[in-house]
Image (tube, grey):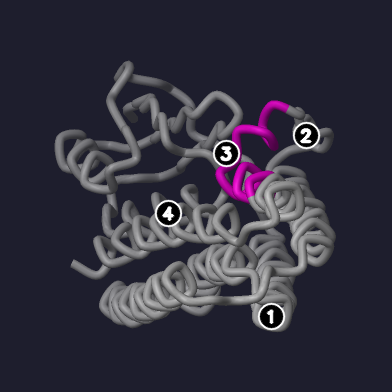
Amino acid sequence: MIKTIFEITKMDCPSEENLIRMKLDEFSSITHLDFDIANRKLTVFHFDQLNQIENAIIELNLGGKKVTSEKTDQQSFEKNKNQKKTLWSVLIINFSFFIIEITSGIFSKSMGLVADSLDMFADSLVYGISLFAVGGSLIRKKKIAKIAGYFQIALSFIGFLEILRRFFGNEKLPSFTTMIFISALALIANGICLYILHKSKSKEEVHMKASMIFTSNDVIINFGVIIAGILVHWLNSNKPDLIIGTIVFILVIQGAFRILKLSK
């Protein structure tokens, strides 16, 4: 067996892990994948197809590159018996906050919250694809990924149009208190998701490192919306909210294109 270690510089949270898992699902030579999100490392245990595996990882545009590749005698790996339960947990948390954020975003007139809700929805799509495609064919998984990717792009495009309308229009200021409060709750929810996912892998990872949370894109986005809410109040302007909304929509579209790569 061969043990190949990859550095994935843009693997910031478990949603990227699920994208990689789905991408590599087609390789029958892979026996096990070991993810180290804290250090952005992926260890692949396989028999052959090294070049194909490396190309598949590079195609995801997550900054993946091969570090080492060597033979190993390791044959047994710890199996995660609660994978479905874990996926259901993070799916429910992300989708619940998608509903909470998009509803509060609409009523508080905050595009930052609306955009952040789509980021939560994007994570839900990734977990949902992983969950509902378990045991299914690769063709089925790719079809689901294609629908999810295009749907995500469509929602983001509508969001961009709304940002332009508000930028040139005379809109009321978004509720900065709602922006800060809901984003703080979303920050806690993302922390819980990371805790659940890492707890499921091994006992040693029960206590999640703080650095792992603060390097997560989701957490950075939550802080971004909180800061935008403070600036909305301080500057008496909706521009900070529109700026953070634009940034998040761009990140959501990038995620959508990664999902679409899985459908090819």
**Would you name the residue on which mark 1 appears?**
99
> What is the quadrant of residue 181 in the picture?
bottom right
Q: Residues within 10 Å of mark 3 (few under 14, many from 20)?
A: few
**Which quadrant holds residue 43?**
top left
Q: Marks 2 and 3: which is nearer the front?
A: 2
Q: Secondary structure at mark 4?
A: helix
**Which residue corresponds to the image point at 29% horizontal and 81% vertical from the top-left?**
143
Look at 75% across and 62% down and name the residue there: 179
Question: Tag 4: residue type?
Answer: Leu
Q: Nearer the viewer, mark 3 or mark 1?
A: 1
Whole-percent x, y for residue 164 in the image: 39, 71
Element under disc 2: loop
Q: Amino acid at mark 1?
A: Ile
The kind of secondary structure element at disc 3 is loop
Q: Residue at x 47, y 28 (%)?
A: 41
Q: Which residue is mark 4?
A: 251
Counting residues from the start of the chain, the first of labels 2 and 3 encountered is: 3
Q: Which residues are magenta?
A: 211-224
Cα distance between the residues tagged 1 and 2: 27 Å
Task: Tell me which numbered mark, 1 or 2, is placed earlier along the sequence.
Answer: 1
Q: Residues within 10 Å of mark 1 (few under 14, many from 20)?
A: some
Which residue is under mark 3?
77
Which residue is drawn at the image coordinates 70% and 43% (left, top)?
198
Instruction: Indicate the quadrant containing the C terminus: top left, top right, bottom left or bottom right.
Output: bottom left
Q: Quadrant of residue 81?
A: bottom right
Q: Which residue is mark 2?
A: 208
Q: Report the front residue among 28 and 120.
A: 120
Q: Nearer the viewer, residue 254 or 18?
A: 254
Q: Residues within 10 Å of mark 4 (few under 14, many from 20)?
A: some
Q: Are marks 4 and 1 in contact (CB under 8 Å)?
A: no
